Image: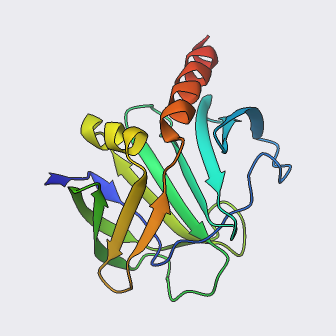
């Protein structure tokens, strides 16, 4: 079992409209692969990947501004009881590899009307599991668990790595 440095995640999985298509100035679409959109965050000079499912649920993955920590974001427009600043324990399973952390609720971080949060980790095994596994099972302490489809993450992460190298210079 691995501890995450910090864990922020919403109590339910749901959606965030693709940032690049929302017209937000600091985000530019770089490319697409296997259902994932690779986006340049011009303010951070880094890239992230984003994928929505048929119900509008969205997962985002990228790097913090200093590029030292990776994140996975999960968002919803659905009504939730997530309150900004509330914390709870969360267990994540990636094909049986378990990761434990602290969850802190967020509302409207990127787009008003959305709630959810981010998982932050500098564990290379966590990143490898995200790239190579197909389902991320999330078990918040105060809500029902949910699954996140990770199909296509390997190619998307590789394209984001290329994008990140280009942003460095």
- Rendered position, 67 above or below 104: above
- Rendered position, 136 above or below 160: below
Q: Quadrant of residue 41?
A: top right
Q: Quadrant of residue 146?
A: bottom left
Q: Is residue 159 rendered to the left or right of residue 84?
A: right
- Rendered position, 54 above or below 38: below
Where does the image place residue 133, in percent across and percent down from the top left? 38, 46
Where does the image place residue 101, in percent across and percent down from the top left? 26, 62
Of 54 and 92, which appears nearest the observer?
54
- Rendered position, 164 above or below 52: above
Q: Is residue 77 rendered to the left or right of residue 132?
A: right
Question: Can residue 22 be seen in this snapshot?
Answer: yes
What's the residue at 69%, 37% (across, down)?
39
* Count of labels in the image: 0
Q: Residue furthest right?
A: 23
What's the residue at 32%, 74% (across, down)?
139
Where does the image place residue 22, in percent across and percent down from the top left? 83, 54
Question: Can residue 41 be seen in this snapshot?
Answer: no
Q: Residue furthest top?
A: 169
Q: Is residue 145 rendered to the left or right of residue 15?
A: left
What's the residue at 66%, 60% (across, down)?
110
Of 110 and 2, which appears nearest the observer?
2
Q: Quadrant of residue 37?
A: top right
Quarter holding the C terminus is top right
Q: Residue furthest left?
A: 1
Where does the image place residue 157, in percent across and percent down from the top left? 51, 33
Quarter holding the N terminus is bottom left
């Amino acid at each position: 079992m691995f501890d995450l440095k910090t864990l922020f995640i919403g109590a339910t999985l749901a959606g965030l409209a693709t940032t690049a298509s929302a017209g937000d100035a600091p985000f530019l679409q770089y490319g697409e692969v296997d259902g994932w959109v690779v986006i340049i965050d011009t303010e951070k000079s880094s890239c992230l990947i984003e994928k929505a499912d048929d119900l509008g649920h969205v997962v985002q993955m990228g790097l913090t501004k200093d590029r030292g920590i990776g994140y996975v974001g999960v968002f919803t427009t659905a009504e939730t009881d997530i309150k900004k600043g509330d914390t709870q324990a969360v267990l994540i399973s990636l094909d049986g590899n378990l990761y434990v952390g602290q969850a802190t609720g967020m509302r409207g971080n990127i787009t008003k009307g959305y709630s959810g949060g981010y998982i932050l980790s500098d564990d290379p095994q966590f990143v490898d599991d995200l790239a190579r596994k197909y389902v991320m099972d999330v078990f918040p302490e105060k809500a029902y668990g949910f699954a996140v489809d990770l199909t296509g993450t390997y190619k998307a992460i590789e394209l984001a790595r290329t994008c990140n190298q280009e942003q460095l210079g």
